[in-house]
Image: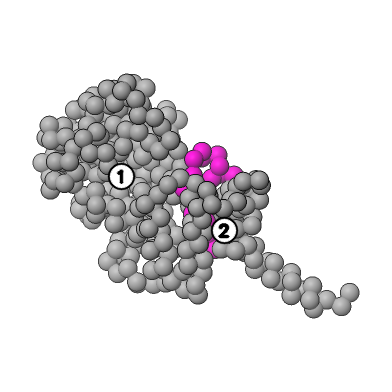
Amino acid sequence: MRHFLRDDDLSPAEQLAVLEAAEAYAAAPLRDRPLAGPRSVAVIFEKQSLRTRVSFEVGIKELGGHAVVLDASTTHFGRGETIEDAGKVLSGYVDAIVIRTFEDARIAALASAASVPVINALTDGFHPCQLLADLLTIRQVFGATEGRTLAYVGDGANNMANSYALAGAAAGMHVRIGAPAGFQPDPAVITRARAIASSTGGWVTVTDDPHAAVAGVDIVATDAWTSMGQESTPERVAALTPYQVNAALLAGADPDAIVLHCLPAHRGEEITGEVLDGPQSLAFEQAANRIPAQKAILAWLLERSDGIPVRTVAAKTRRSLVGSTS
């Protein structure tokens, strides 16, 4: 069973295939409907959401399916039973599971027990669906990702920095992560990203100099300094202020560079309103690309699903029992 729990669950070739499918969905949103029936997809939120919830609901509908949206705070999901048991139960109801949750170990446990594909809609460690949308946006502007240089500046110890390192390496990009000491990525993630990059022509660099990070780059990306569940402190803001994406910092990038932000943005903190609303910003186009990107990965996983859904097995068992004379 194939799952999409982190960016490197796709090989470089597989990532390219998904991005090409996303481009096709962006050009013709109703080009095919692999979920027609409708087939159902559980979309679970243990963290709050706007873009992820709406984009998955709309995308599943456009694929001909039905989104079963579960707010974990108002259901018994994972409470009073193991998440593995919940995964087995849901596998008997739906054809795929999308979850936005906390620890990566939690989504891994869910996937270990599920007999349908599981998609990471955001965890503490990774945000792979967002990166598919980002790479799609880059391809729409530049025609390809290979050889392009992207600077991610700000909090480098969060899920977006990890995903930029892994997905950017797979896409053949040169990724620079500019972050202060104490806010830099997990070394294990960087080691993994460099191993991937060795086969794609990309590379990943970590620096504490924001100006060196953005010098001459094609893409400047950032994210909120305080992730969901974290506390914004004066010390945190002070450490990250030199990494704000503002006009002065952006001036060091290529004149035709684009700016990405996965949103929601805290204007005046990690990015200024002048840049976010400026001509180089594609943050809102990037947000819209969540729909075709997520449709592409969902359709790709379902096409390659090699397991028999639990509900099919259960139905056969019921028929066997009904017809038995023993």
Q: Quadrant of residue 242?
A: top left
Furthest toward the right, the residue is 326
Residue bounds of the magenta highlight: 95-109
Instruction: Tell me which amino acid carries mark 1.
Output: Pro
Of the pair 60 and 197, the residue shown nearer to us? 60
Helix, strand or loop at mark 1: loop
Magenta stretch containing residue 101, yes or no? yes
Magenta stretch containing residue 322, yes or no? no
144 lies above or below 184: below
Helix, strand or loop at mark 2: loop
Q: Which residue corresponds to mark 2? A: 116
Q: Earlier in the sequence, mark 2 or mark 1?
A: 2
Q: List x then y, in percent, for residue 321.
A: 79, 72
**What coloring was used for the rendering?**
one colour
Q: Which residue corresponds to mark 1? A: 264
Q: Quadrant of residue 209?
A: top left
Q: List x then y, in percent, for residue 23.
A: 30, 61
Residue at position x 24%, y 26% from top?
Answer: 241
Q: List x then y, in percent, for residue 134.
A: 30, 49
